Amino acid sequence: MCASPATLNYAAPLHSRMKVASVVGARPQFVKMAPVSRELRKRAEEVIVHTGQHYDRNMSGAFFETLDIPEPDYNLEVGSESHGRQTGVMLQGLEHVFEVERPDRVLVYGDTNSTLAGALAAAKLQIPVGHVEAGLRSFNRAMPEELNRVLTDHLSGLLFCPTRTAVENLRREGIERGVHLVGDVMYDVALVSAQAARKRSIRKELGLEAKGYVLATVHRAGNTDARANLEGILTAFSRHKGPVVFPIHPRTRKMIAQFGLEASLGSNVRLLEPVDYLDFLALLIDAAKVATDSGGVQKEAYFFGVPCVTLRDETEWIETVEDGWNVLVGADAREIGKALDSFAPRGTKGVSFGDGHAAERIAELAARG
């Protein structure tokens, strides 16, 4: 059942098992939550709260069914706002839900405003917080996501780290209690989803040859909201000799129009509406290269051995760069073009993102009293 805060039932039942509230606000967080939720429900009662931070037309019933994700129990329907207003409205709604549901623990995912709002609302009510993807750092405090990560980690009592680098980042900040190296839940998801993704026909429907195109994603405000950055990225895509398949985020489409950059798009750039997770994974697996400013896509490219060109000057997934499979180029058209033409990984992949059982470890730790 989905409900707005105004229609919540205050008659909260008593519960004998541990009750965990999972807070998510965007499609990638639902994907990360999927394996954790499956394992958690074997051990505890779970309440899923969707803040509604991002409206996503692809989050239909089919989305939940395909990835076996439980539908949210609450949808706060916050929508797009400025950072302060959005976080404030979330805090109000989440506090209301937590007071009704009385969870024993709150789980938050990643680095969005929903992540911070969930952690802050829980901490103020003295509810223990668990953070999935704890310890990630880009060391760029100009990024809202970096602030969300740092603050959430310092509010959390259980910190679920995907890599040893993340554990070390926390140690340098004086956080050692409650830190657990569990592996990356997105690796769990990728392993389970790869077989289904390879059966998808989207590449053939688009008339693309395997390893004959670049897959691109652009969504971060540092690129979409800065005209020079967005123009540089689009120019590089348009100069590329081969097809660039570009599932376009609504925000990015809006800013291209607002800046009058439609003419910067060459005929080789194939704009698509956002695609579902399995279709995206199918396109990624068969791509020659990936160009992205997404942290999650950087990892997925690494998982499947696809060279990644990152449209940022820093990354929270530094292991992919150090291992030679990811290159940071920022938004400069010339540097992006050089990387799309000539970047090639060095040797085989050597970094571990776990063994595909991160969700089990997280659920076990989160369900403990």
Image (cartoon, rainbow, N blue to C red):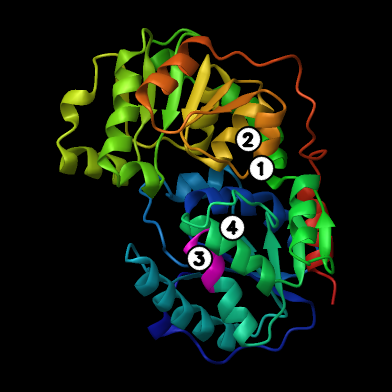
Mark nearest the camera among 4 and 3 is 3
CB-based contact (under 8 Å), mark 3 and mark 2? no
Residue appearing at x 68%, y 23% in the figure: 324
Q: State which tag comes first along the sequence, 3 or 2.
A: 3
- Amino acid found under the numbered disc labelled 2: Lys
- Residue linked to disc 4: 70
- Residue linked to disc 2: 299
Left or right placement of residue 338 versus residue 152 in this view: left
Mark nearest the camera among 1 and 4 is 1
Q: State which tag comes first along the sequence, 4 or 3.
A: 4
CB-based contact (under 8 Å), mark 1 and mark 3? no
Vertical position of residue 28 compared to residue 235: above or below: below
- Residue linked to disc 1: 186
Furthest residue toward bottom = 11
Q: CA distance from mark 1 to mark 4?
A: 17 Å
**In terms of secondary structure, where does tag 3 sit?**
helix
**In terms of secondary structure, where does tag 2 sit?**
helix
Mark 4: give few (<14), some (14-19) or many (20+) Cα within 10 Å: some
- Residue linked to disc 3: 114
Q: State which tag comes first along the sequence, 1 or 2.
A: 1
- The residue segment tinted magenta is 111-117
Vertical position of residue 250 compared to residue 143: above or below: above
Q: CA distance from mark 4 to mark 2?
A: 25 Å
- Kindly tell me whether residue 328 is visible in this rendering: yes
